[in-house]
Amino acid sequence: MAAEPAAPTISRRGLLAFVGAGSAAILITGAGQSVGGPLRRLAVLAPRGGDQGGGAEFPINKTARNAGVTPAMTGADYRLVLAAGGRELQLTRDDLLALSQRTETLPIACVEGWTATRGWTGVPLAALAAMAGVPPGELLVESLQPRGVLNQATLSRDQVADERSLLALTVEGEPLSLDHGYPARIIVPALPGVHCTKWVAALRFAA
Amino acid sequence: MSRYGASPLHLLAHVRVPAGIAGVLLLVYLPGITGKGDPVLEGVSGRTLDGALEAWLLITAALFAVSAVLYGVRRQRRA
């Protein structure tokens, strides 16, 4: 320790305030990345979400382009495969829209750290199981996404049986955008966003 | 009153604090501010960080401006 220290250029209180202000700056610029609503606009240095077309302003985890999903795959030739016990049904998106729809307000809680709660409309997974001719059971969801670890996910019997679990076709009354999983995506309560499979190609129920 | 007298009023502190906060923000958001992270971010989220550099410059300017005003007020009070 110096015997005769130079006069301080900042007080102890000032130094603490300096550290606090630095932390506050990170908190303020980061809050909008995790929390939705008006706070989203505070994330000026690393914005997520916002109007990216398609009527859905919540953040995108992975774009269709990155996933290798093209508009041709989701166009008029799209068929959802509904399979159980060796039997297979094929449904167009219009067929799905003609089924009894249910709307649920559920969050997408993404492992990237953001959450967005929206109103989703689609067909309950339990109803699709019934259509396939089986009671709700374990379900393998396959995506149109040709590669990557998230091109399929397995849901448990309880998740399929929950009346809030949907094969969603629209969000907030708008058709899903391609980047949000058009033609259809999974939305299940309390399921990490990465397992809410986008671009669903097939639902394979355990018989 | 501390043994060093009244809390020091130093121009240096009023440069150091805004520079420090702006530096922390630059360090944390460097990939966005330089635009080097854009290709990866666009693939993941569909959007780029256009405007992050401008936002950081504006924040930095505002921090220095607030600090300068505070310095002026503190000097007035001591004069």
Image: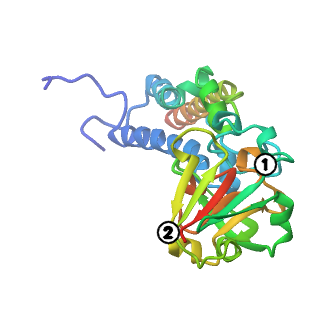
> In the rendered view, does B15 fall on the left or right side of A160?
left
Q: Is residue A192 visible?
A: no
**Foreground residue, A58 or A154?**
A154
The one nearer the camera, A47 or A15, is A47
**Residue A80: x percent and y percent?**
73, 57
Helix, strand or loop status at disc 1: loop
Q: As drawn, is B8 to the left or to the right of B23?
A: left
What is the chain identity of the residue bearing mark 1? A
Secondary structure of residue under mark 2: loop
Which chain contains the residue that carries disc 2?
A: A
Name the image colouring.
rainbow
Q: Return the residue at label 2.
A: A156
Residue depth check, mark 2 versus mark 1: number of the one nearer the observer: 2
Of A67 and A52, nearer the camera is A67
Q: Which residue is mark 1?
A: A177
Between the C-alphas of marks 2 and 1, the distance is: 27 Å
Tally the marks: 2
Quarter containing the N terminus of chain B: top left
Q: Is residue A101 visible?
A: yes
Question: Compared with residue A137, is residue B74 higher up or lower down, i.e. above or below?
Answer: above
Question: Which residue is farthest front?
Answer: A86
Residue B67 on image: x %, y %: 56, 32
Q: Residue at x 77, y 42 (%)?
A: A73
Mark linked to residue A17: none
Report the amino acid beneath label 2: Ser
Q: Report the residue at 68% width, 39% height from top.
A: A63
**Is A31 placed above or below A125 here?**
above
Q: Residue at x 60, y 24 (%)?
A: B33
Residue visible at 43% across and 44% down in the picture: A20
Q: Position of residue A113 (x, y in %)?
A: 53, 50
